[in-house]
Image: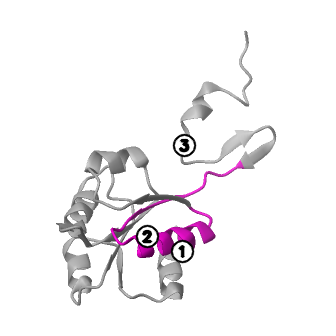
Amino acid sequence: MKESALFSPALLFFEKFPILEGHNIVTMQKRILIIEDDNDTLDMLEYLAAELDLEVITKSLLIPFDEIIGLNPSIILLDHWISGELGGELCKQIKTDPSTAHIPVIMISALNNIAQIAVNCKADAYLSKPFNIDDLQKVIAQFI
């Protein structure tokens, strides 16, 4: 059986690139991973990200680095203080590993020194809680 050039197996591995579907090109939806332990904040962040037409994955606890690799997010919103653990440590791991360093990480926190924390963990941006919704949307849009 002869394979069609339009639907060759070589096209199947282009997860991050447009996919051919019939004669139309369909682009892949960008995926945001939100890690936040406050349920109200998590719900609000999920809603706002969905309004930006992002596929949203939420976690209320820090997750293992390997799970982040498997989720393959386009961008990460990461609270610094999550149930007694430091999101900044996970951010540092993400930004120093060659397989994930390209993923933008936006740190969020109510701590006064979040700017310094973001610098120390190599975050791409940060927002102080409480944050302005317009500022959140602008910083996300900057990286997607």
Residue sitting at the far top: 1
Nearest to viewer (mark 2 / mark 3): 2
| Residue found at x 66% / y 26% | 8
x and y percent of residue 45 in the render? 48, 72
Residue at 54% across / 43% down in the picture?
15
Q: Is residue 79 left or right of residue 96?
A: right
Circle 2 residues within 10 Å: few <14, some 14–19, many ≥20: some
In the image, residue 95 above or below residue 21: below
Amino acid under label 3? Glu
Q: Which residue is mark 1?
A: 141
Cβ–Cβ under 8 Å for marks 2 and 1 = no
SS type, badge 3:
loop
Task: Give how far across and how far down residue 85 sits, in percent.
Answer: 19, 65
Q: Nearer the viewer, mark 2 or mark 1?
A: 2
User: Sequence-wise, which precedes: disc 2 or disc 1?
Assistant: 2
Mark toward the start of the polypeptide (3 vs 1): 3
41 part of magenta stretch: yes
- The residue at which mark 2 appears reads as 42
Mark 2 and mark 3 lie on one chain; the one further toward the N terminus is: 3
Colouring scheme applied when the structure was drawn: one colour
Counting from the top left corner in percent of width and height, residue 42 is at: 43, 70
Q: Judging from the image, what secondary structure is the residue with disc 1 in? A: helix
Q: Where does residue 67 sit, x and y in percent of width and height?
A: 33, 46
Figure check: 64 above or below 75: above
Q: Is residue 113 left or right of residue 46?
A: left
Q: Which mark is residue 15?
A: 3
Point out the image quarter for the N terminus.
Answer: top right
Nearer to the camera, 139 or 83: 83
Please state the extent of the stretch shown in magenta in the rendering.
Answer: 26-54
What amino acid is found at the position of numbered circle 1 in the picture?
A: Ala
Q: In the shown orientation, is residue 119 left or right of residue 35?
A: left
Residue furthest front in the image? 39
